[in-house]
Image (spheres, rainbow, N blue to C red):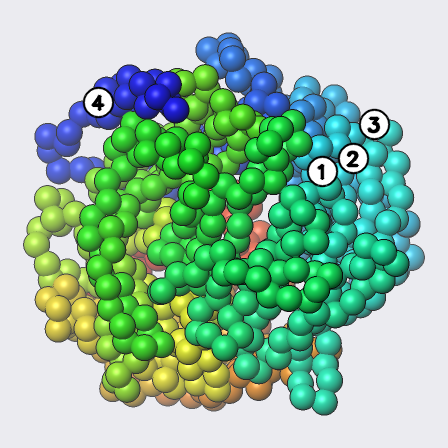
Amino acid sequence: MKWIFAALSLAVAALAAQPAHAAPPKAPTVEQLAAFPAFSSFTLSPDGRHIAALRADGEDRYIAVWQADSLDQAPTLIGSDKMKFTGVTFIKNDRLAVSLWQPYDLRTDRVTRTFLSKLMITDLAGREWKEPLTLPRANTREEQLAQARTSPTVLDRLANDPHHILVINNIGASAGDVFRVDLRDMSSSRIQMSGENVAGYVTDLDGELRARLQANVDGTGAYIAAEFRNLQNGAWEEHFRSYVKDRDQTQIVGFSDDPNIAFVQSNVGEDKSSIYEYDIAARQRKEVLFQHRFFNANRVLVNPYRSAGDRFGRILGVGYEGPRGDDVEWTDPTLRALDAGLRQALGIASRQVSLVDPATGDRAGVDYPVEKDYRILGFTPDFSTVLLSLDGASVPPEYYLFRNGTLSLLAKTYPEIDSGALGITELVYYKARDGLDIPAFLTRPNESMCGKGPWPAVVHPHGGPWARDTMDFDGSMWVPLMASRCMAVLRPQFRGSDGWGRKLWMAGDMEWGQKMQDDKDDGARWLIDQGIAQEGRIAMFGFSYGGYSAFAAAVRPHGLYKCSIAGAGVSDIGRIWARFYTNPFFRQAQEHTVKGLSPLSAAADIKIPLMVYHGVRDQTVPVEQSQWFVSRAKASGQPVVYHEIEDYGHGPAWTRAIMGRQLRYIEDYLLNDCGGSGL
């Protein structure tokens, strides 16, 4: 592998020779933050001969297709008249899967304002556009709405089959069924019928359906059953059953080149998931492939190409839910050598980071690339061509191509944004009032631009709540906006957050607005105690479940917040979950966990000034949830600002003007209002 190191070493000077900031960085404008990324959604053809991406031109986006060995030549551009592109990916050397969307109004007894989403397949010139599956004509308005909002899902692009892919239908009587689609004439044949409880399939390296999950309820409660298909008789046989109430999780995450050996991810008996080999025929657990002391192991990366010869089926690396959410440890010697060269060429440095296990309180120091890291997006069977992205919490994504020993910069997503203005982000831990260790991502503003702390600060909880934040670039632009306006931002991974182990996850059950909210308040107190935040100048801002948290912050007494911003927040937890828990599995699985404070009940007595905004087209959290709260909150005597945004759903924004309007509402309220004179 000396050729890799030699070639990459030559690239160091060109890529690292970036001018140092001689003056304080300049904060990006709202227009720059609201713009589409100049280039995004890069994808590599399996043979490495073509690259495609989305290219932005103001409000328009195009698909750009380049020849990988002629990047200096103008790409082929593919446009769309009415719908907007949201993503593109190669599914074959000569075929692209493209996702599109647009606003959609369905008129029945009332008008449902939502968005239409479509998955289409086209050639590299954009001459022919086909849907992966032809659906029967909708017979009712309800079926029409469902078809408009739902598209098939590509299950497997079948890396070793030049003409076929596997897709899952997601609507109608055949919902959940798996089809083999011939891309030459777009004919399809059903290869698997599914019951309503099937939650997903896993294919082996030959593209055969080999595993699936079933969601159901028995006398013990809601469970997920992991099943394998018997190769002798084709029958589906249950091998594992995991009960949701215990947060047990057992999933099949892949197969080795021996179709009898599966890779299983499981946290049974543990706080964190590990991955082990499993002998299907013998029903026997084999050796542990990977486990991480502080994070869930979550995937095995395998070379899927038969043309790779003896490299076919070789394990390349293992993944875990680290600070970036999809961290990788490369195990294959070729990838380890390539990794070392790429890190040197891209200027990726590691530094000591302290990790804490919320389950045990154990601590350790590890080397971790805090400022930025890269991800491999695609590769050829022999790794002679590799597509990768580079980003960090304060580094907007950049795309590179490693080809035949040369590393080239393809594009920067936001070339006009000065990354130095976006502050510095790190993983921190603080103690909740009951002693639980709470992970959090802290972004400090740039001192050369904002002076030394303490600064005004924002506690910024994520949505979900069964979700988490990561330490990569925040494409919502909320954190970059606030940090570039000289505010410290804390994103607490409060109890109830997923991805940090079973104990922290389950600790949020039935604690909505209670201990879950205490964790956020304890984060605000920690900011003050650490000299990061100015007491009396802290706000809370959140969206979706984070919006619920912002409502809760407004009604809870003895808070530390000067004001609160609720985006698309849930105010009545009883009515919102009655909307979603319409089948026995979900009622058993999660409904009992959603207990605690319903902010609407105390809205007339909010304690702090409040700004609320909500999209009119939001079909996840209906706009009425904000309307109800604002109507009552105005009787409190506290200042209440309310914005409804046309053609905005539960994110993302339909136009750049809408994106800018949302960011400007947040900016203006924090800088100039927040109950008077700004934060």
State the CA–CA distance, disc 3 to disc 2: 8 Å
Residue with the mark numbered 3: 184
State the CA–CA distance, disc 1 to disc 2: 7 Å
**In the depicted structure, whether residue 488 falls above or below residue 181:** below
Residue type at tag 1: Leu
Residue 545 visible in the picture: no
Residue type at tag 2: His
Q: Residue at x 60, y 78 (%)?
A: 244
**Which comes sooner in the sequence, label 3 or label 2?**
2
Q: Residue at x 86, y 29 (%)?
A: 185
Q: Could you tell me how many numbered marks the image carries?
A: 4
Residue with the mark numbered 1: 158
Q: In the structure shown, which secondary structural element does the residue marked by tag 2 occupy?
A: strand
Q: Residue at x 18, y 69 (%)?
A: 527
Q: Residue at x 71, y 38 (%)?
A: 158
Residue type at tag 3: Arg
Q: Position of residue 219 (x, y in %)?
A: 72, 89
Residue with the mark numbered 4: 17
